[in-house]
Amino acid sequence: MQNKKIKSALISVYTKDGLAPIAKALHQLGVQIYSTGGTQKFIEDLSIPVTAVESLTTYPSILDGRVKTLHPKVFGGILARREADHLQQLEKYEIPEIDLVIVDLYPFEDTVASTDDENQIIEKIDIGGIALIRAAAKNYKDVVVVPSREEYGMLADLLEAKKGETELSDRKVFARRAFKVSSHYDTAIFQYFDAEEEETAFKHSILRSQSLRYGENPHQAGTFYGDFAAMFDKLNGKELSFNNLVDVDAAVNLMAEFQDAAPTFAVLKHTNSCGVASRPTILEAWKAALAGDNISAFGGILIANTTIDLATAQEIDKIFYEVVIAPDFDADALELLCKKKKRIVLKIKDFYRHQKSFKSLLNGVIEQDTDLKVESREELKQATTKAPSEAEIADLLFANKCAKHLKSNTIVLAKDQQLVGMGCGQTSRVDALKQAILKAKQFGFDLNGSVMASDAFFPFPDCVEIANEAGITAVIQPGGSIKDQESIDYCDANGMSMVMTGTRHFKH
């Protein structure tokens, strides 16, 4: 039978946070609870009956707590298949069935991060807990395993909805998460022993993980692997979601291009920038960035390359957004921004970007060098008879940086160091340009004297033709098409300038 009723539970956790409601729910369902040490006392203090594991094993906790649950009367009750032969053995040796195992492992990674004391670190290598998790997960056809506090919510929902009964599919989900926990835990321990550097250096290299509320959508599980605190001080707000993290990553990668530029503000939505501007002050930069698309800015991610002052905070406080990021905040600005408790406020410590980027696909992973190339004025190759003006060159380089961080195919229109129109994620470069022009006109921009950046070459002269009709006077593109000369000839015939970079910036 696939459906199983939870009649007994073994609870052995390091941290008791969030355990009380679970213990109470199990008690209300009449579940027999077994426990050890501090967990047992915690449950007893809730006035909930609990049976000491020692009463099963007839052995006390020994060796400074290193051995508590490692005994056939514990693991037999977990590993036994609910079949005649195994059940007869349980009866013969007076071993109770254990239907639910709840574990929260010793905090090995936190200990490594907080101390250099090897003795303390070694004592935080959980033995009994990891064995309980693996045993219960192996026997998922009969046993429910809860491998960490992250699964308490799942268990609570299950107990409430099904009154202590579980289906095979439920138990298999918990088992999958259990092996994920044990795999990560063992990896962290391996990395500790495998490191060749001094302990004080390698303790920061251990891959940390944080379970997220869910992934891209509520039906998808999500986990963040990394050290978020190394890059940011989180000053306010709710926990970052999967989508928040993806957008924050896109925002940081974009703003890294403007790290040493004039005060610059950017607004991103679904990893694409809908507003970017550089100005003499951060307040002016914000107003110009918002003007790029004040509709898409709703619920977006905001990022600045310099300190946000009170005047700027007052302006950005007028719209709804998810996250604001800056290298610093004036005290009065921070006080204002933090009044909305759910708003995420991040102080960025370093505009760090990985040298390598990875993507999982098919049945494997692909790796590439991160696109860190930034074109300089000296690298621009003049392709047309007419040279761009100094102001146009500045706008072309600005637009090229923006185009690099938009999904392909993409076109960026810029004027006076402001993104005034963009088309991205299009299957045709012509469609991307038409979208950019449409957005620019929608938000009242005059495209006469503006510039155009393309992430890849123009296969035909149609884009420069459309650009000219819209009033665009200068173009930046990688070049490399067999029909480059047709686009160049059109520009020459119509008084436009074009420069080529020789570098394509596809972003899939």
Image: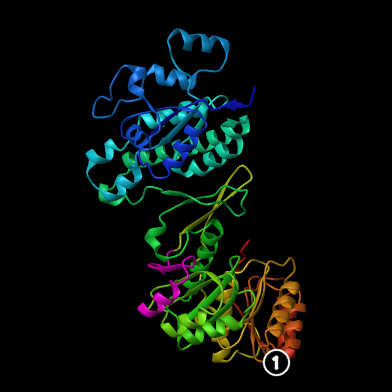
10 Å crowding of disc 1: few (<14), some (14-19), many (20+): some
Q: Is residue 503 in view?
A: no
Quarter location, residue 119: top left
* Residue 44 x %, y %: 35, 33
Q: Which residue is more in the foreground, 223 or 367?
A: 223
Instruction: Classify the position of the C terminus by image quarter.
Output: bottom right
The answer to whether residue 265 is left or right of residue 13 is right
> Of all residues shown, which one is farthest toward the front?
47
Q: Which element type, helix, strand or loop, lies under badge 1?
A: loop
Residue shown at the point (46%, 64%) measured from the top left: 237
Please report the bounds of the magenta region as a residue range: 331-352
Q: Which residue is more in the foreground, 461 or 262?
A: 262
Instruction: Classify the position of the N terminus by image quarter.
Output: top right
Rendered view: 103 above or below 457: above
* Residue 10 x %, y %: 43, 28
The answer to whether residue 334 is left or right of residue 124 is right
Question: Residue at label 1?
Answer: 495
Quarter location, residue 499: bottom right
Residue shown at the point (52%, 12%) measured from the top left: 87
Q: Which residue is more in the foreground, 159 or 448?
A: 159
* Residue 157 x %, y %: 56, 42
Is residue 336 located in the magenta-colored stretch of the structure?
A: yes
Residue shown at the point (61%, 35%) measured from the top left: 162
Rendered view: 402 above or below 149: below
Residue shown at the point (75%, 72%) measured from the top left: 431
The answer to whether residue 382 is left or right of residue 226 is right
Is residue 99 located in the magenta-colored stretch of the structure?
A: no
Which amino acid lies under the numbered mark 1 shown in the image of this protein?
Gly
Report the label total.
1
* Residue 189 x %, y %: 36, 39
Q: Is residue 36 in view?
A: yes
